Amino acid sequence: MPHPDVEAQADLLVETAYAKVNVALHVRARRDDGYHALESLFVFAEHGDRIEGAASDDGAIDLVIDGPFGAGLDAGPANLVMRAAKGLQAYLGCQHGARLRLTKMLPVASGIGGGSADAAATLRLLVRLWDVRIDAEELAALALDLGSDVPACLASVTQFVTGRGERLARHDVAGLEGSPMLLVNPGVGLSTAQVFAGWDRQDRGALCAESLERLIEAGRNDLQAPAVAIAPMIADVLAALDGADGLRLARMSGSGATCFALFDSEAAMARAAETIRAARPGWWTLETRIRSA
Ligand SMILES: C[C@](O)(CO)[C@H](O)COP(=O)(O)OP(=O)(O)OC[C@H]1O[C@@H](n2ccc(N)nc2=O)[C@H](O)[C@@H]1O
Ligand SMILES: Nc1ncnc2c1ncn2[C@@H]1O[C@H](COP(=O)(O)OP(=O)(O)OP(=O)(O)O)[C@@H](O)[C@H]1O
């Protein structure tokens, strides 16, 4: 449904805020600035939140939120959509305004970067809406101010990510893009900072992402153990996925609690999703595919 104030406007633009999944996430060190040095292979789902916007002449930015996970999410200045819009406006020093709508399809605080993807999609949308030219590096710096995952969410394609999340290299892995991917969340929200704080500070080694086989065999999510310690239900999600026909890999994404499962066919994914929905009607599931560039 379009924003009530912009229903009749022709210049309504739409962006998808694609869900982010960490196929592997190796935490290598705690840094002096409190962040952690990471190595991660990021992929993106074909589905996500939806952001729409139309220009306003008065210079104001306003946001309405709807969608299955919209309730309880504040549309005020702390919302990452608002922070992204205000950040871009301040950077440009411009008087452009926008009326925005966020349709929240992804669970909040769930390890699939929903807020980060929303922020990046808002930046993409406003650059188009306001028809401004902005240097890619400057846009990436604005994105990083909003969160460690936001720079990677700008392009929303498969990337090898290092640093605190800002060092990005496009990195296709044969057999990954287009692959059927099931997301499962047991309905618990986790604080990213709290999960990082539970990491045991053991460096378990570098991430090799040269092939899907290596990612499956030697890849890890080092935040999985601290997340399970906070929310033991994550282990139930992984147990529910374990042993499904056609399963290639099941692992937690980001700081949890969402887990992803890669399947070798759409039919196998659909069967596993159906089984989980029947056994656990309260869990959120999304049948999707890994997005290609
Ligand atoms: C877990 C991941 O989602 C993996 O992609 C990201 O590392 C987190 O990205 P994000 O949610 O955008 O995180 P931010 O908003 O930048 O940081 C939230 C909190 O997570 C912790 N944090 C985040 C990123 C990082 N490299 N090291 C950290 O220790 C910090 O305590 C920080 O205060
Ligand atoms: N537009 C938004 N969508 C979701 N969360 C938002 C938004 N704006 C602000 N937030 C806040 O950001 C926090 C993190 O939400 P988000 O859904 O991005 O977490 P996440 O999926 O765990 O992220 P990551 O995978 O980057 O760790 C929540 O506490 C939420 O209140």
Image (cartoon, rainbow, N blue to C red):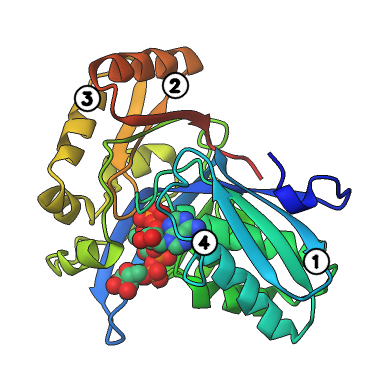
Element type at mark 1? strand
Residue under circle 4? 75
Residue 14, x across and y down, in percent: 73, 48
Foreground pick, 278 / 79: 79
Residue 102, x across and y down, in percent: 59, 51
| Mark 4 closeness class: few <14, some 14–19, many ≥20 residues within 10 Å | some
Q: Name the mark nearer the viewer: 4 or 2.
A: 4
Q: Hey, which residue is sitting farthest front in the picture? A: 4
Callout 1 amino acid: Ser
Sequence-first disc among 4 and 1: 1
Foreground pick, 32 / 192: 192
Sequence-first disc among 1 and 3: 1
Residue under circle 3? 240
Residue under circle 1? 56
Residue under circle 2? 264
Sequence-first disc among 4 and 2: 4
- Mark 3–mark 4 contact, CB under 8 Å? no
Q: Name the mark nearer the viewer: 2 or 1.
A: 1
Residue 256, x across and y down, in percent: 29, 49
Count of numbered circles on the image: 4
Q: CA distance from mark 3 to mark 2?
A: 18 Å
Residue in view at x 44 percent, y 21 percent: 264
Q: CA distance from mark 1 to mark 3?
A: 48 Å
